[in-house]
């Protein structure tokens, strides 16, 4: 590894509106190594590999590949330079067969123009065999499990014979066994001289696949170190390492009676006997990695997932929640993880804010426009939604402001139980503090808040109690102040 | 351009509004009105691609043909556009809800046949006959809505199926002959009553009855879409079905109500058309579905749902009506008229797309 690096990134810089995603990051990759990228959510890992794979342009900096400076202009261009990307979000076409997906866009042709089907199936079979996968290449992708789809995704990239492979959290959808299979594969590829950049949230994976580790935090590179110096404690300290000031203005409240109680909640393959209670005026945090079941749990509470067994009590009364409509009727509100799922883009800001409280601003089905406008103005001012134009269509707002609208919707719905899945996603620090102030106000009024967050400092500071989840099970419960970032991370990974 | 004007008007206003006087001067009030008017005009011009097209069309035809610009011709156009306008109002609601209704022409024929058969063969009185026709339309729409939501079938497919089903039922009901007719196996009890014909061809104080019907339906449609929770639900479901669901809006209920309204309006159109033609038959309104969709598209409603409005569609229907009328007056052949209509649809939509991107409205 003493020779020149295969790939070198110098001072890569990238900004999105309101976020400095990458701040002059240097990075290098040698032939035949696996270089692991670590960092909290939003640290810039995905942005970095997206720049490398050509799906995002960089603002400035240099990419030097095999000693020559290159400008990567598109995913197709990246591919022609020998850089292949395994996407975090699956990029397969469900209705096409496994083989077609693997060779998408470059189906081999036989002598006369027609697609050489036997040839494709045979080649696909070979690639799958190399991965030790027992998947029929003629089957449409939609019949495969999520994990199998993820593996086909990997097969697709492998078939390109690339020299550099980028993996963005490849194991989040895989079972233990499949993960092991993937590690073997990654190591085998590396021995064949392929270089790999590997993003992961699972710290336990680091020594299994990597040679070197680079930690990013808030868009800056913190350090690059060989894997034998990168013990878990060191890495975690590097990853989180920020001081907590008054970013989180948590006010103590005394929780009242239980308003939401969950007993033995089970969903096959996703949730395993989950118990918890939420009290009036309490913030309960749920922390887990991708695929731990946190989102499934709250979706189930909101009537979006079918529950196999278990009981839910609201204010001591047993309830069955079969639809969001029913959940809202019972006093629940749910801010989705992906804000696309919660907002109506072609609708105005004010209509989005009042969408879940139409009953409150109407009489016999007739809307009271003046009242609606007052409600809208209140939230636009309180959360400083910018631009402060109620009639502007939501799609013309920036991401952070869209998130504020999504929050406003539930704040104004008068729900007694609020479920927030990553409530501060894409929101800048100043506004975050304001939102937490609103949380305080809500809890004082007796609202119970269930908050999923992958931002450790946020959850540690704001939640009265924290549940750690792993693979659909609650693995630990802490009171506020009882745990540290390190302990919490350990109990979920 | 718009931004500049906004800036201009605010700079004009500011010094005036800082005058420490509780009674605003006449000048400041006037400048305020002017700037407010400017704002209103600006917003509406930006919104009103279709209305600009309509005005241009009228101005052009007024100069091009001596027979065009007079009241009796306008009343004539209104009568001719009325069927398409009524259907287009309903189609707008369906399309804003991210659906499409291909069955409207057939449902129109079925409803019209039902009313006509009821009064001429079954001897029912006029009111019952009309209610039966409207009820048939509404019921058909309701069934379409149920099939789409409960059967989880795409709107396009369900309404395509309903299109041929309703047409078939109309043929069965009328035995393939115009109603009333002497040649059916059914006994002819009476011709269409004068009241029914009045609905299509009558006047109230010189205003054609169909014109009044359009005005009433447009106002009701506009009220529903802008002033009711139902309208809000339709926009929400059409804009993002999943987000609407999570906000507690029932997709099933919204869809079914929308299609029921559409069916009811197809019934209204059927009865007006029967009155105008003095007869009903099972093949009425063929192609009406595409005409109504064209009016909606010309009117600026997004074919993928979530945005648009009924007033635009009314204008769209009138653009189509005036175009047909004007081109007739100019002796343009009916064949070329179709070509021109096609070009206009494309032109209007291209302009609309550009306007949305350019002004972010």
Image: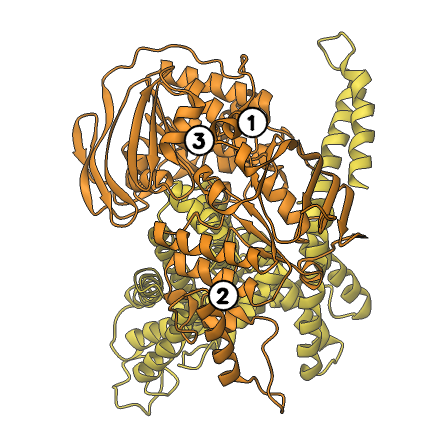
Chain colours: A orange, B yellow
Which residue is identified by label 3?
Answer: A453
Instruction: Report which quarter residue A395 is drawn in.
Output: top right
Instruction: Identify the mark nearer the N-term, 2 or 3.
Output: 2
Badges 3 and 1, same chain: yes
Quadrant the C terminus of chain B occupies: top right
Badges 2 and 3, same chain: yes
Instruction: Report which quarter residue A44 is drawn in.
Output: top right
- Residue toward you, A222 or B266: A222
- Residue toward you, A274 or B164: A274
Residue A93, label in figure: 2
Name the chain under label 2.
A
Of all residues, the one furthest to the top in this rendering is: B20
The reply, left or right, for residue A263 in relation to residue A481 is: left
Of all residues, the one furthest to the front in this rendering is: A2
Which residue is identified by label 1?
Answer: A238
Instruction: Identify the mark nearer the N-term, 3 or 1.
Output: 1
How packed mark 2 is, by other alpha carbons closer than 10 Å (few <14, some 14-19, many 20 or more), is: some
Q: Is mark 1 on a helix, strand or loop?
A: helix
Residue B313 location (% of width, % of height): 58, 58
Residue A330, placed above or below residue B12: below
Badges 2 and 1, same chain: yes
Name the front one of labels 3 and 1.
1
């Amino acid at each position: 590894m003493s020779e020149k690096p295969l790939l070198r990134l110098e001072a890569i810089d990238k900004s999105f509106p309101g976020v400095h995603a990458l701040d002059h990051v240097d990075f290098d990759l040698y032939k035949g190594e696996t270089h692991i990228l670590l960092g909290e959510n939003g640290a810039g890992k995905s942005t970095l590999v997206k720049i490398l794979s050509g799906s995002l342009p960089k603002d400035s900096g240099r990419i030097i590949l095999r000693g020559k400076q290159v400008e990567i202009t598109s995913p197709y261009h990246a591919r022609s330079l020998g850089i292949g990307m395994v996407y975090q979000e699956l990029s397969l076409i469900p209705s096409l067969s496994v083989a077609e997906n693997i060779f998408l866009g470059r189906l081999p042709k036989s002598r006369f123009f027609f697609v050489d089907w036997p040839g494709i199936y045979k080649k696909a079979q070979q690639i799958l065999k190399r991965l030790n996968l027992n998947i029929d290449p003629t089957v449409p992708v939609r019949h495969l499990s999520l994990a199998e789809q993820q593996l086909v995704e990997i097969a697709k990239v492998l078939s390109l014979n690339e020299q550099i492979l980028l993996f963005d959290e490849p194991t989040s959808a895989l079972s233990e066994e499949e993960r092991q299979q993937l590690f073997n594969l990654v190591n085998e590829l590396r021995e064949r001289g392929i270089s790999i950049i590997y993003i992961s949230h699972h710290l336990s994976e680091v020594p299994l696949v990597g040679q070197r580790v680079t930690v990013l935090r808030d868009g800056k590179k913190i350090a690059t170190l060989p894997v034998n110096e990168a013990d878990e404690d060191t890495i975690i300290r590097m990853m989180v390492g920020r001081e907590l000031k008054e970013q989180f203005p948590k006010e103590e409240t005394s929780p009242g009676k239980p308003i939401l109680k969950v007993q033995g909640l089970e969903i096959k393959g996703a949730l395993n006997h989950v118990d918890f209670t939420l009290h009036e005026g309490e913030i309960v945090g749920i922390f887990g990695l991708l695929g731990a079941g946190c989102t499934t749990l709250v979706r189930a509470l909101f009537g979006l997932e079918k529950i196999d067994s278990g009981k839910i009590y609201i204010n001591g009364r047993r309830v069955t929640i079969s639809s969001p409509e029913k959940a809202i009727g019972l006093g629940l509100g749910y801010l989705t993880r992906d804000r696309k799922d919660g907002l109506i883009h072609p609708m105005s800001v004010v209509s989005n804010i009042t969408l879940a409280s139409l009953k409150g601003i109407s009489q016999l089905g007739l809307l009271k426009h003046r009242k609606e406008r007052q409600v809208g103005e209140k939230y636009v001012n309180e959360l400083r939604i910018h631009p402060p134009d109620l009639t502007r269509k939501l799609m013309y707002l920036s991401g952070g402001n869209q998130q504020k609208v999504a929050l406003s919707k539930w704040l104004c719905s008068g729900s007694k139980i609020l479920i927030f899945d990553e409530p501060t996603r894409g929101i800048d620090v100043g506004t975050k503090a304001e939102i937490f102030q609103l949380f305080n106000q809500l809890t004082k009024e007796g609202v119970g808040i269930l908050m999923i967050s992958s931002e450790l400092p946020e959850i540690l500071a704001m939640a009265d109690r924290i549940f750690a989840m792993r693979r659909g099970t609650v693995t630990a419960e802490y009171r506020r102040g009882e745990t540290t970032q390190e302990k919490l991370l350990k109990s979920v990974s | 351009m718009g931004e500049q004007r906004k800036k201009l008007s605010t700079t004009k206003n500011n010094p005036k509004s800082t005058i420490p006087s509780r009674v605003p001067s006449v000048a400041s009030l006037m400048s305020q009105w002017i700037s407010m008017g400017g704002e209103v005009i600006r917003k509406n011009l930006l919104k009103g691609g279709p209305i600009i097209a309509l005005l241009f069309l009228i101005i052009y035809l007024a100069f091009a043909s001596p027979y065009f610009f007079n009241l009796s011709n306008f009343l004539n156009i209104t009568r001719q556009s009325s069927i398409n306008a009524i259907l287009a109002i309903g189609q707008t609601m369906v399309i804003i809800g991210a659906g499409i209704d291909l069955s409207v022409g057939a449902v129109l024929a079925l409803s019209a046949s039902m009313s006509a058969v009821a009064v001429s063969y079954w001897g029912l009185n006029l009111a019952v006959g009309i209610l039966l026709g409207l009820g048939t339309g509404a019921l058909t729409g309701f069934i379409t809505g149920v099939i789409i939501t409960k059967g989880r079938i795409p709107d396009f497919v369900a309404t395509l199926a309903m299109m041929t089903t309703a047409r078939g039922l109309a043929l069965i009901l009328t035995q393939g002959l115009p109603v009333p007719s002497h040649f059916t196996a059914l006994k002819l009890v009476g011709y269409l009553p004068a009241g029914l014909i009045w609905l299509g061809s009558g006047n109230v104080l010189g205003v054609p009855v169909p014109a009044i019907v359009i005005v009433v339906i447009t106002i009701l449609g506009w009220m529903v879409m802008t002033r009711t929770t139902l309208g809000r639900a339709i926009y929400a479901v059409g804009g993002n079905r999943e987000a609407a669901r999570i906000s507690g809006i029932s997709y099933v209920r919204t869809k079914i109500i929308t299609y029921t309204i559409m069916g009811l309006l197809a019934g209204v159109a059927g009865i007006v058309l029967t009155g105008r033609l003095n007869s009903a038959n099972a093949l009425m309104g063929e192609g009406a579905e595409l005409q109504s969709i064209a009016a909606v598209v010309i009117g600026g409603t997004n074919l993928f749902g979530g945005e648009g409005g009924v007033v635009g569609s009314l204008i769209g229907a009138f653009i189509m009506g005036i175009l047909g009328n004007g081109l007739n007056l100019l002796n343009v052949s009916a064949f070329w008229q179709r070509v021109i209509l096609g070009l206009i649809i494309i032109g209007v939509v291209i302009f609309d797309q550009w306007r949305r991107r350019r002004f972010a409205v």
